[in-house]
Image (tube, rainbow, N blue to C red):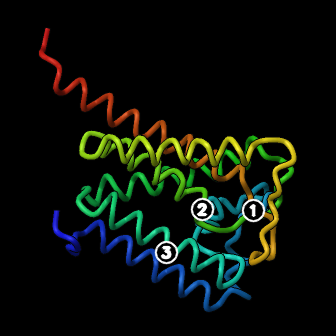
């Protein structure tokens, strides 16, 4: 694989990054209109299930998620079809928001891409597992360890550079969504290679 090839999937990654930067430039407007808000969603503002992930609580939050998105899209999804990659992103966004809405009733507000990024990372390392099995297995183990730690009682969700606590449940829901997607792809790949009976 070339070091950097501007494939359709990589262009999608770049486009989403530009969108995040533009929304961040108008944070005073976009935050209240687009963030995950339990009350607003309950009143029918369902677009927030998607839009919440592209706005951020400050420049550091944006820079951190933007960098992770660029690396994830370049390393794991550069050669994946645009349809497959775009659908995976959409599924991760909806999976995180659905998890928050259904299983984290104490969370009233949320913004940021980190939950969906956990989903992309898990799905990506599973999908490319056969290419670099040891490296991918290690990456998966690190993600699992991180998420387990975040779910332990007493875990400190504060962050010195963020104005809000880290919504660790979003990481869990994103990772579970990515796990389901990645296992589904592996299962289909395995069935396709199996000799017909």
Q: What residue sits right under mark 3 in the picture?
A: 67
Q: Residue furthest top?
A: 197
Q: Earlier in the sequence, mark 2 or mark 3?
A: 3
Which of the numbered marks, if any, corresponds to residue 114?
2
Q: At numbered mark 2, what does the secondary structure look like: helix, strand or loop?
A: helix
Q: CA distance from mark 2 to mark 3?
A: 11 Å
SS at circle 3: helix
Measuring from the top left, give residue 57's x and y in whole percent: 71, 77
2 and 1 marks in contact (CB < 8 Å): yes
Disc number placed over residue 166 in the picture, else none: 1
User: In which quadrant will I find the C terminus?
Assistant: top left
Q: For mark 3, does the 10 Å Cα neighbourhood hold few (<14), some (14 to 19), or many (20 or more) residues?
A: few
Q: Position of residue 91 (x, y in %)?
A: 48, 50
Q: Could you tell me which residue is drawn at 54 percent across and 53 percent down?
A: 118
Q: How far across and how far down the image is residue 144, in percent?
A: 58, 42
Secondary structure beneath disc 1?
A: loop
Q: Quadrant of residue 48?
A: bottom right
Q: Position of residue 61 (x, y in %)?
A: 65, 76
């Amino acid at each position: 694989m070339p070091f950097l090839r501007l494939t359709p999937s990589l262009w999608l990654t770049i486009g989403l990054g530009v969108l995040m930067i533009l929304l961040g430039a108008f944070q005073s407007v976009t935050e209240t209109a687009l963030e995950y808000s339990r009350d607003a969603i309950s009143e029918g503002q369902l677009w927030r299930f998607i839009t919440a992930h592209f706005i951020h609580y400050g420049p550091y939050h944006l820079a951190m998620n933007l960098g992770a998105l660029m690396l994830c899209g370049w390393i794991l999804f550069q050669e994946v079809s645009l349809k497959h990659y775009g659908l995976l992103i959409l599924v991760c966004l909806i999976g995180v928001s659905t998890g928050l809405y259904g299983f984290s009733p104490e969370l009233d507000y949320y913004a940021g891409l980190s939950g969906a990024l956990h989903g992309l990372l898990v799905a990506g390392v599973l999908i490319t597992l056969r290419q670099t099995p040891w490296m991918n297995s290690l990456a998966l183990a690190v993600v699992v360890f991180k998420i387990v730690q975040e779910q332990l009682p007493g875990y400190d969700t504060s962050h010195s550079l963020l104005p809000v606590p880290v919504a660790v449940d979003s990481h869990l829901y994103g990772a579970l969504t990515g796990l389901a997607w990645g296992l589904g792809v592996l299962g289909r790949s395995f069935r396709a290679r199996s000799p017909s009976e």
